[in-house]
Amino acid sequence: MRSIFGGLCAALVTAVLAAPAPPVPAAAEPTPEPVRILLVGDSVTQGSAGDWTWRYRLWQHLAAAGVPVDLVGPRTDLYDNVADEHGSLAYADGAFDRDHAARWGMQVEVLDVPIADLVAEHRPDVVVEMLGFNDLYAQRTPETVAARIGRFVDEARTADPTVDVVLAEATQSWFPAVPELNARLRSVAAAATTDGSRVVVAATAAGHDALADTWDGSHPNARGEVRIAWAVADALHGLGVGPAADRAVPFPPVGPRSGARLSAVPRDASATLAWTGPPGATSQYVWVRDVTAGQAWTRLPFRVAGGAWTARYLTNGHRYDYRLQPVKGDDEPGGRVFSNVVRVAPSPPPGAPRRLAGDAGRRCAVLTWLAPRHARSYQVQRRTPYGWRTLGRTIRPRYLATGLPRAAAWTFRVRSWRGDQRGDAATVRVPRGGPAAACG
């Protein structure tokens, strides 16, 4: 038995050793580390409420090319150009990597955070710098600003000697000192480039049109965002990051891409419009049509701002439709972008309540009246030695006043209202009732 068992074991071992080994799975390709890019700039890079920003356009370009990228920085916000404050997140499309280190009004001479600290904390592979215009606007010379940009590169390298840097041109070429600064950037890049850290220039000012590519002469609209992103993409391509820009892609429409939230209150031969938004819109065109007269939509020949406007010289009893078309700076929206439509029917203020009467108990009174035309609510007041005191409001033609002071009689006034449109009032004197009288 032992010999048979031993023979079986030997045969089994031999068979196992002779069998082909199972295939070893191939090692998975390691996922490439994303390229970390730090965008440092001023308002042109930060963007304002309602913008996509050129940061978004660059991210789209790299994502579409399959380039793993991580935009880094301490901020994610836009500047709210209407409220005049930072912290807006009202992007036209916020579904992208929004990290950055840009701030409205920032100068290369006065950085919010020293570049060495930013590089040490966020560990970028590439720093894209787009600063200098605000320094020039503060009366510094192009030579001085160019030298400061050179020191910016040196300071970045104190935290990482291998970091690459893109110097983007200022796009406000209408400002006399900007072309000279842009020309000097090539010399700065050539002098700053080392074997371990390359410096290149992004030609962001090339072809940039202050009228067509901005909404106010300085800040990029959708077209300008694309142009800046093209130039930065080309500069990154020169560093081996992603493909060059595809300039065959058509420009997107400019101007706000959403409408305001509009409401309206009818008044006597007028209507007051009130609205909020959309983000970044600086004014609105008013469109109107007289529905009763069968008119088509007409755009008024001026713009309104501030969140409220009153249309005057309307015909009482007619129905009017209104809508708003948003504008940002000098950019009207490409395509049909409007608010909701509101309909109003202006009318005279409501008349006084009719047949106002009262029935009183010892400390209470019931007031009743007939509703005048156009009245929607009523204000009830009682006369005191110090003037009229408001007791309350009601939408019904009846009011119960309780807790009245001891008196032989009380004088009441009831005023009609239509929304916030004040109407006429009626007055009645009500004698106090006897012990058996009750209010209810």
Image (cartoon, rainbow, N blue to C red):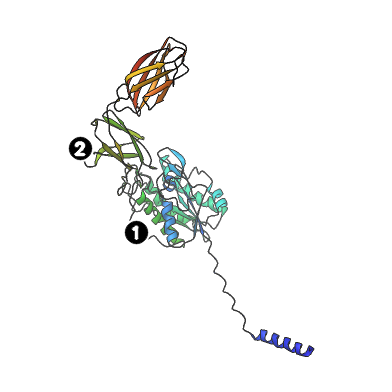
Q: Is residue 31 left or right of residue 381?
A: right
Q: Secondary structure at mark 2?
A: loop
Out of 126 and 96, give the one closest to the viewer. Answer: 96
Marks 1, 2: nearer the viewer: 2
Q: Quadrant of the N terminus?
A: bottom right
The crowding category of the residue bearing disc 1, from other C-alpha atoms within 10 Å (few below 14, some 14 to 19, many at least 20), is: few
As measured in the structure, the alpha-carbon distance from the residue carrying label 1 to the one carrying label 2 is 46 Å
Say which residue label 1 marks.
249
Amino acid type of disc 1?
A: Val
Image quadrant occupied by the C terminus: top left
Left or right side of 106 for 358: left
Mark 1 near mark 2, Cβ–Cβ under 8 Å? Answer: no
Q: Residues within 10 Å of mark 2 (few under 14, many from 20)?
A: few
Relative image position of residue 316 (x, y in whole percent): 24, 30
Q: Which of 325/104 is in front? A: 325
Q: Position of residue 420 (x, y in %)?
A: 35, 28
Instruction: Name the foreground residue: 165 vs 323.
Output: 323
Q: Is residue 269 above or below residue 5?
A: above
Image location of residue 140, percent across then percent down: 43, 41
At x 38%, y 42%, the residue is: 278
- Identify which residue is drawn at 65% across, 86% down: 18
Image height of 82 relative to 24, above or below: above
Kind of residue sitting beneath label 2: Ala
Asked if 347 appears above or below 260 in the picture, the reply is: above
Point out residue 63 in the picture as x, y percentages from the top left corner: 45, 59
Quick one: SS at disc 1?
loop
Residue at (43, 52) in percent of width and height: 55
Identify the residue at image location x=37%, y=61%.
246
Q: In terms of sequence position, does the residue under pointer 1 or pointer 2 come before the other?
A: 1
To which residue does mark 2 refer? 293
